[in-house]
Amino acid sequence: MQLRYYGTLFLSLYATLNSDVQAAVPQSWKQGAYAYVAGENSLDTVLADFARGFGVNIEKDKNYTLPVEGTLRAADAESFLNRLAMQYKFQWFVYNDTLYINDIKDKTSRRIMTDAVSAAEAKQALIDIGLFEPRFGWGEMGNRGAVLISGPKKYVSFVEQFLSFPKDKASSRVRNMIFPVKHMSVVDRVIGYREQKLTVPGMATLVRSVMGNGVGDNSSSWMPEMEASSDKTLRTLAERNLPPGLAPYPEGGNGRIVADMANNAIIVRDDPSLRLEYQSLIQNLDKPKKIIGIKALLVDIDRNELNRLSINWLAKIGNTTISSMMGRRGTIGLNNLPNLLADINYLEGAGYARVSSSPSLVTLDNYPAVIDFNDTAYVKLTGENVANLKPISVGTSLRVTPRIITENNNRKIYLYIDIEDGKMKAGPIAENVNISRGEISTQAVMDESSALVIGSMQKRTTQQTESKVPILGDIPGIGKLFTNVNTTEQNRERIFLIFPEIIDETLPDNISNFSNLANAPHKEKNNEPFRYNISALLTSLDNGYAPKWLTKGGEGMTLKAFCHDNPQFAIQNNGQQFYRGQGYEVTIGTI
């Protein structure tokens, strides 16, 4: 036993003179050999003698009565404790002049929010106060402001107490941050569609869905709480544009996210340590959108005449050619637009077709566009001592959501289409209204510069015309003998033709010089001018207005040089105009 006391007396004196009791493992424990003659002492006695020899307190989670026999030697005191810990299944650490002993099973893992400090700063702070122990687990969660630790429950509790801050202190570190948004709207766009509301989420809604409510203060946002299903959908939509490795922030925060519509910016009141995360999310969502033009034709075609003329409109699917008579229901895509439009013009000129409407509009890639022509009737609802008017809308509506798909440098347009066509007529009772509706909901993938034909909805109408001999036809009784009534029945098909077109790659960043661009040569794509530019130019020339790069006058090739004779068309020789450009000529005329 003398060897034990002499050895511990020497090391204890050395520790008193040279050690810093705040160190996680005192430096003196790593210097000089250590030996202990245990005899038949218990582990509790051995640990108590060790702590007394180095002038530290000891705290154990239980009694360790296992016997320790023989003489134990190690390179230093730290190695001596590690040897006992491995042999007798316990964990140890030193903090604030106390040696803590815990059973090896008494361990846990915890995620700790570090609030306004980074994980690296938190680690350095633990090292500075002598609490950090590299033998236990430590993980840093990037710029999330959180760390993962594992080890004895007592050790984890100390770390958590040191790194956690009261809520009132955390809220005092929140800051106002402003993030400008360039291409996307910060507020939600609400589209009225009949009796429904279609909401396109803005930047503020998407950021709030991904980041939660923030982690700053307890003030509530101005934005209303969304239902769980809507929140899940918006979160999925926003996360599709996140870069790899950037996961959504955990839910449950209480920061504030506000949309500044006047400046098209997002105002965030939250912990400034999350600035980079907010900025990365907004930049990945704020991408320029391509512009898509949508033109629709609603055509009523006589069914009998259509079948008699045997007009086939072809659609190709893969290597198979499908010939579809429009008297059958279906949806087809057509690439031969000139023939398609020529057939419609011919039928309309002959009185066998009528173009009911031809609306046009533009929208952004993957944004819905709505065209709605409706009549509204107010139906009287009566009850006991109560009367109310309920609006009912019916007519023709078209909702299209285009999306551009690029595969192998070939661009296609994916269309989500919802069509409703209906009419109303008076019922047998004055307050009643009879309504008939037809609905079509479909999807299609199309090539650029092609048309989608959707049909068909049958429309049967009966028209009576009365003709009579003047004066004689008005004589009571015998007037019917001089009167003729003709009943005409029309059986028509309503066809919907949709022409989508990618108008431009993106919105221009600076449109202040748009007036100058109007007098510049039009942008070309694939060495061909845009079709909408050509149409606008020809209309302008026909009205006598010419851009600066064209000179009016002279003589050029007439329309007969370009158009073949056809009994269905006539070329007006009078009124043809000629223009000259740099290396080309333009002839304007009427067919």
Image (tube, helix red, strand yellow):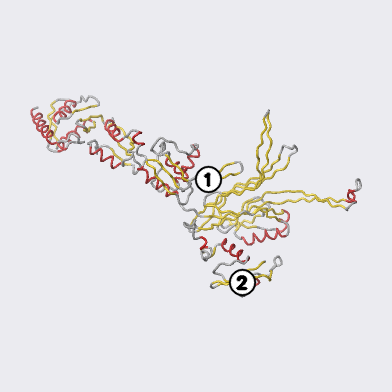
Say what secondary structure mark 2 lies in.
strand
Instruction: Give the crowd class for mark 2: few <14, some 14-19, many >=20 residues within 10 Å.
Output: many
Q: Amino acid at mark 1?
A: Arg
Say what secondary structure mark 1 lies in.
strand
Q: Is residue 202 left or right of residue 316?
A: left
Q: Is residue 243 left or right of residue 15?
A: right
**What is the distance, in whole Å, between disc 1 and disc 2 at their CAs?**
47 Å
Q: Are marks 1 and 2 in contact (CB under 8 Å)?
A: no
- Quadrant placement of the N terminus: top left
Report x, y in % for residue 340. Answer: 64, 59
Report x, y in % for residue 78. Answer: 17, 35
Q: Quadrant of residue 266?
A: top left
Is residue 452 visible to us here?
no
* Upstream in sequence: badge 1 or badge 2: 1
Q: Establish if 100 lies above or below 556.
A: above
Report x, y in % for residue 75. Answer: 14, 37
Is residue 5 visible to us here?
yes
For this rendering, which residue is in front, 564 or 220?
A: 220
- Quadrant placement of the C terminus: bottom right
Q: Residue furthest bottom?
A: 555
Instruction: Give the crowd class for mark 1: few <14, some 14-19, many >=20 residues within 10 Å.
Output: few
Q: Amino acid at mark 2?
A: Phe
**Residue topped by disc 1:** 189
Question: Residue 499: which disc?
Answer: none
For this rendering, which residue is in front, 585 or 512?
A: 512
Report x, y in % for residue 317. Answer: 58, 55
Q: Quadrant of residue 574?
A: bottom right
**Residue topped by disc 2:** 578
